[in-house]
Image: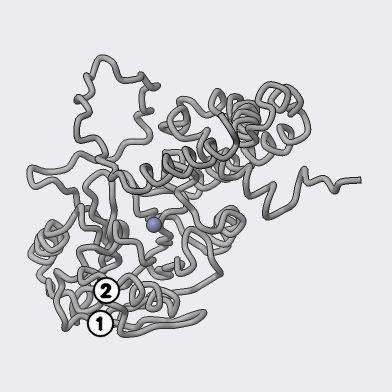
Amino acid sequence: MTSTTNRRSFLAAGAAVAAAPVVAGALASPASADELPDYAPVPPSALGPAVNAQGYFVGRVQKNLYWVTDSTYQAAFLTTKDGVVLFDAPPSIGQNIQRAIDQIAAENGVSNKVTHLVYSHHHADHLGASSLFGKHVTRIGHTENKRLLARDNDPTRPVPDVTFETRRTLHVGGERIELAYHGTNHTPDNIYIHFPDHDTLMLVDVMLPGWVPFDFFNINEDVPGSIAAPAKAMAYPWKHYIGGHIGRLGTRQDMTVYRQYIDDIVAGVKLALVNVDPTPFFVKYGNNAWAAVKEYQAAQVKYASDPVIKKYLGVLAAADVYTATTTFLILESIRLDLGVGSQVHP
Ligand SMILES: [Zn+2]
């Protein structure tokens, strides 16, 4: 075959690939449960209270501050003499948010009317039930939250009516809530929600009490910003932590364990960048640069994450499920944001 026909057949194959629709999973056979991989059992300390028949649990955080969960997502609300301030509206809890508020309001003889809805950040999995609360609720978020929600143009997540840049104190019905922006972390708009009269901090998608982060370090958009967030959280006075995920509240001890877990990954990655020899990967894969890089980085991730998984099994739930992907994202950040392991050609 000449190089011309090679090139022609390559272009023809490329055109066929571009034209063919991908029908994902349409013909895939369903997985059989007994063929799926096993993972270590979840430590009982990671689990929260059982949900009721409607699929939710609502409980007191402190005084008139409450949290509601479906065991995967969390929202919070503050009852006041002038109505209810709601913090996030995850669609998975959906109509159960108002049911939980109705239950607490009836028990305490206070208003069940949501008057304010504070947005932690723009992600749909935490705000997708916002539109259930209608047009007459005052929505509050960071200025970047408004910009991102305007971009996303999702009718389930109306843009905030009130925005702030760095700090905003909300006074509703005699209650005080301190909102603050301390730079990007999980997203460019994720805020710190402090309840100074309730010993509570709400910071979503950073530390998930009792659990390792979700896949690829919570899909954090800013890895250095996310690694820096726990220290900023700890600078506040609080006893109770609302992390937005899984079925229980957090403590300062949870944050300490989480910081150590991330520190251990960072230390492992720095060692892997020095100690894993790239030579065999480039010898084996020759001109297939991506194959060499993929296998080289997989070896670095394994080097860094294996001891961390071993250390945290039984301490943090799902250490064996997601530590490797979180290590991969932190490896890329240490390489690309911090420049560790970068070599200038002589
Ligand atoms: Zn998020």
Residue 253 rendering spot, x and y as whole percentages: 51, 44
Say whether residue 261 is visible.
no
Q: Quadrant of the C terminus?
A: top right
Residue 133: quadrant of the picture = bottom left
Q: Which residue is labeled 2 in the image?
A: 117
Camera-nearest residue between 213 and 49: 213
Q: Quadrant of the N terminus?
A: top right
Give the Cα separation between the discs numbered 2 and 1: 6 Å
Say whether residue 135 is visible.
yes
In the shown orientation, is residue 267 left or right of residue 207? right
Residue 242 rendering spot, x and y as whole percentages: 37, 55
Going from N to C along the chain, the mark reached first, 2 or 1, is 2
**Quarter containing ligand 1?**
bottom left
In the shown orientation, is residue 327 left or right of residue 19? right
Residue 222 rendering spot, x and y as whole percentages: 55, 58
Residue 18 rendering spot, x and y as whole percentages: 37, 48
Q: Secondary structure at mark 1?
A: strand
Mark 1, residues whose alpha carbon is within 10 Å: few (<14), some, or many (≥20)?
some
Q: Residue furthest right?
A: 346
Instruction: Report the amino acid beneath label 2.
Output: Leu
Camera-nearest residue between 4 and 203: 4
Instruction: Report the amino acid beneath label 1.
Output: Thr
User: Residue 261, which numbered label?
Assistant: none
At 34% from the left edge and 85% from the top edge, which residue is drawn?
162
User: Residue 138, which numbered label?
Assistant: 1
At 40% from the left edge and 21% from the top edge, which residue is drawn?
40
At 67% from the left edge and 34% from the top edge, which residue is drawn?
268
Vertical arrangement, residue 47 with respect to residue 117, above or below: above
Residue 148: quadrant of the picture = bottom left
Q: Are marks 2 and 1 in contact (CB under 8 Å)?
A: yes
